[in-house]
Image (tube, rainbow, N blue to C red):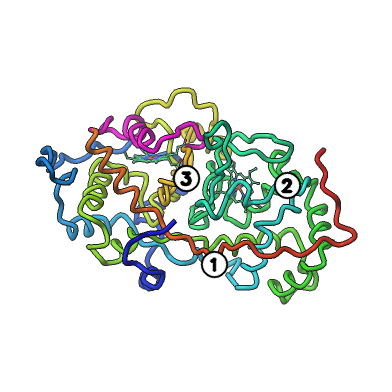
Amino acid sequence: MTTKSRFTPQTYRRLAFASLGALLMAPGCDDSKDGSAKAPPKPAAKRTYGEAPAEGAPAGPSVNPEEVQLAAKKLFQPLQDEAKSETNPWSKEKADLGRMLYYETRLSKNHDVSCNTCHDLANFGVDVREVDGKRVKTSEGHKKQFGERNSPTVYNAAFHLAQFWDGRAADVEEQAKGPVLNPVEMAMADEAATVFVLKSIPGYADAFKAAFPDTEDPITYDNMAKAIGAFERKLVTPSKFDAFIGGDASALTDAEAAGLKTFMDVGCTQCHSGALLGGNQFQKLGNVKPWPNVKDEGRFQVTKSAPDKFSFKVPSLRNITKTGPYLHDGSIESLEEMVNKMAEHQLAKGSLTPEETQSIMTFLGTLEGKIDEDYIKKPTLPESGPETPAPDAS
Ligand code: HEC
Ligand code: HEC
């Protein structure tokens, strides 16, 4: 993808640095870290626009971008260029190893599934495989088995308050230990079998040693996860929205700024706020009007606390135009339908006018960010050794 704006990677980097020290989450979002769902949002304030646009005029109300920017700065922050971790500080060697492991199909039983299979880095980190001309709702893993949930994007995920739709892993390092052993994903027998494979590939000895220089026996399951985690911590996709929040009121067109105003006015920001427009709280799907047929109990499976039934991590809206199908089960295909359903089921306001929906859609487009093509480039993977097990389709 390309953003045809005047914002070069340098601009983004400058903005990212300018934002260092800025808080990741919007103030006041921390109170839901215990995972309990919040009360439904209050009705949106009375709106000050709504006249039909004059003929030939661009759709949407006219707004003052500086005013919108001022209001938005209270709710959002620019993306930082790295999701920092104290327990797993980033190093180039770690990220280089993590990148290899991310693309490593030999971490799957049948050597046919890697992280990239379900989280395609060239395609905004989601599963873009298709069945009957449509993107899969949930992902196919080992032996053509399908999981129960939609593959969320790995871009910007390291910033989330927790990993998975239900938040059951604390961070990307803990998360990375899951799929390798998951029988419907990569299906390795256990940690020891995985470490055996890594040790059997001669080229990994040096890569692990470089990434974990102070360790006697660097090839461990934990270090595998740390390397992948470090790699993921710089999978960030700044967009022109960051330039806007970071100070340049002209970074969004008037229609885009108007869309942002609509997004804030109707109350989407009750849940989708912060640097990711999501990722910082759990909320019930259908908190105003029940969502039909939710089978997955979401956060409840982790906390066993009744108010958490059917609550999920509020997804980030970064790159949302590219990461469908939507929701934890991938049940909604079109973004427009998704926006309308959100209004119906999540907002006290209840529904949107077609103009409001279009306006929000225009804004959501500004969240499509820039992928660092060099950073995600698939490296040459080291060759198997004599002990490396053969693919096993059983
Ligand atoms: C067979 C498909 C598949 C494979 C292979 C796979 N994942 Fe996933 N991934 C998923 C699905 C589905 C989820 C959501 C599961 C859930 O929430 O219960 C997920 C969730 C995640 C998340 C959480 C993102 C968020 O927003 O919460 C991250 C990060 C992630 N995977 C990274 C990885 C890494 C790293 C690997 C390789 C070690 C990997 N995945 C392998 C399908 C896959
Ligand atoms: C009360 C909290 C809340 C409000 C308000 C809310 N959302 Fe959401 N939103 C969620 C939750 C929770 C999910 C994920 C639910 C699931 O996966 O089952 C979600 C999912 C989404 C998704 C799909 C994301 C994906 O990756 O699958 C989009 C798009 C979205 N919301 C946009 C909006 C818009 C636009 C508004 C305002 C009209 C809005 N939301 C208002 C909580 C909210």
**Region of the chain picked out in magenta, as a range:** 327-353
The answer to whether one can see residue 76 in this image is: yes
- Is residue 333 shown in magenta? yes
Q: Amino acid at mark 3?
A: Thr
Name which residue lies at 67% across and 66% down. 97
Q: Which residue is mark 1?
A: 374
Residue sitting nearer the eye, 288 or 126: 126
Name which residue type carries label 1.
Asp
147 sits left or right of 9 in the view: right
Relative to 311, is 203 on the left or the right? right
> What is the C-alpha distance between the residues marked 3 and 2?
23 Å
Magenta span includes 265? no
Residue 277 picture location, percent across and down: 38, 51
Q: Quadrant of ligand 2?
A: top left
Q: Residue at x 25, y 40 (%)?
A: 266
Seen in the picture, residue 262 relative to 242 is either above or below; the reply is: above
